[in-house]
Amino acid sequence: MKKNPALYAALFCLCLCACPVTEPPEPIKIQGRIRLSNELVTAKYEAVNVNIYDKNGEIMSSVTVSPIGSPAPSMPQYSWEATFIIPAAAAPVTIFAELDLNGDRFYSEGTDAIVASGSNYDLYVSEAYTPLFKKEELKAIGKTAAYPLNGKYILIKNLDLSDGVWAPIGTEGNPFSGIFSGGFNTISGLRLPGGSNRYIGLFGYVLGTGAAHAGIKNLKVNIASSSISLNSGSSEQNLGIICGYAENAYFENIIASGTAAGLKITKANGFAGVSAGGIAGRIVSSATSPTTTFIDGGTRISGCASLLSLTLNADTVGNTETTYLGGIVGTTYTNGTGALLITIQKSYSTGTINLKNTTGNAAAGGINAYSFCGSGSENARIIECYSSGDITCKGIRLLCGGILGSNRDSSKNTISYSVSLNDTFGVLSTGVAHVGKISGEAVTPTRNYNLEESTIITDATGTPTIETTSGDDIPRSNVTELWFMTFAGSPNNWDFNSTWKWDSDSLRPVFVWQ
């Protein structure tokens, strides 16, 4: 058959008209400043770069910048400007500052952003971070000389750890004492060990020493584990998604999450207790001398959330056992020299808490299960926190609360500007039990609130003591105005500019950065 050129030309033109033409992305031009802390002022840097990574951790652009003016005794500044093309699939990007000082590299915290032309970003470099690009580098912390346990690390990209059971960073004999920043990246696929391990989490044992503080911050962790079986004989076990045990340390801007089924922990065949929480199992504030100081005067959890439902089944355990399960932390403990302090602030948990089959002393709390303050000038405080998951306890001697389960000294434990959004408290006790919508035992309270509609369900064989002094009832219909009106103004202001944002779906606050 003879071809018709005119027909083919017409069909070609029709195809061009019918098929949409995708325009290439416009170049994006952004700029900003790099600011240095005082200890880095006088250094002579071989290179000052700004690196821009896509959401997969691949570098998109790197620009070399120059200082503004001459070095000053206060914080110097470096200007930077970058022009690059970003596909829609790459958003958001992460922006880092990188300083090369005779081969040692200093990294800023990462700034996550969906950028637009003309945007300005200030990057602050305060510490010498070792960058972590690969899971092999994360695993090497404490295992090789290049990655010491007292180092400072920053995660540059998301990591997947689903290839095997994780070996926690730091042990009691060799604790992690450095700083770890996740750069607001996500570690996924974390599989926690069980068995006789005493300190279980991404980090096992964290210890600040001298006048220094250890810290974990700016991180999201999603665990792949849905069940863990513990068996430590006579040794107490501490389990947290982020850290099992931490002393003289801080946790900041962290979210822990997992599967829809949550995490089920079974403790069997032993007479020791368990302390478990969504962020940390146990945190401790102690002092080796009166001059020892840490962030905010003590050990701190700030800006942390657990989105994980937790179940702890203390099965066939003897009466000497103590069992604590908290949405954020299992146990806080202050005991030592000087004015010690533990603070949990600007944090929340949304998962259910289910503590069952306990035969010894047991406590469950939406934020903290048990708070111990020693005989000195120790204090523990919970400020600007909330929990929203149902809490259920079953056993012989129980303490249960929407924010705090139990405490050793009510005059040293304060709960302020916090909210219990828990619908149900189920206490199934055959012995002594205490339950409260804010705290299972009396504390020193300041303007706390709990749902008027929430219910406390008890079994027929045990009648719990109801603690009602820690919070005021508020109808569910008034919950929204609680944050924007009741809590408005200093000193009880929930900051909806830099810390919190309102989630219209769940009708509760979440973090600005999450």
Image: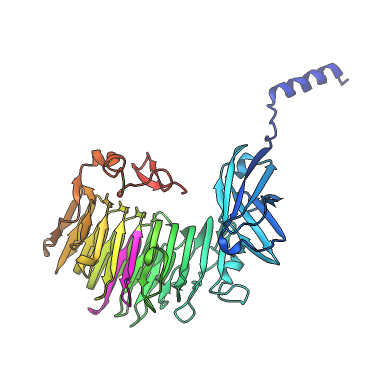
Q: Position of residue 138 (x, y in %)?
A: 57, 67
Q: Which residues are magenta?
A: 315-344
Q: Position of residue 225 (x, y in %)?
A: 44, 63
* Total numbered circles: 0
Q: Residue at x 61, y 39 (%)?
A: 88
Please tell me whether residue 334 belongs to the stretch shown in magenta.
yes
Q: Position of residue 398 (x, y in %)?
A: 20, 67
Q: Evaluate whether residue 56 shows in this view.
A: no
- Placement of the N terminus among the 4 image quadrants: top right
What is the image's colouring? rainbow
* In the image, residue 438 above or below residue 193: above
Q: Position of residue 99 (x, y in %)?
A: 66, 59
Q: Residue at x 62, y 49 (%)?
A: 54
Please tell me whether residue 378 belongs to the stretch shown in magenta.
no
On the image, which quarter does residue 256 sit in? bottom left
* Left or right of 266 in this view: 422: left
On the image, which quarter does residue 324 sit in? bottom left
* Left or right of 513 in this view: 477: left
On the image, which quarter does residue 506 sit in? top left
Q: Evaluate whether residue 373 shows in this view.
A: yes
* Left or right of 300 in this view: 168: right
Q: Looking at the image, which residue sits at the far right?
A: 2
Work out whether residue 306 or residue 248 is closer to the camera in this orientation and state it. 248
Work out whether residue 494 or residue 47 is closer to the camera in this orientation and state it. 47
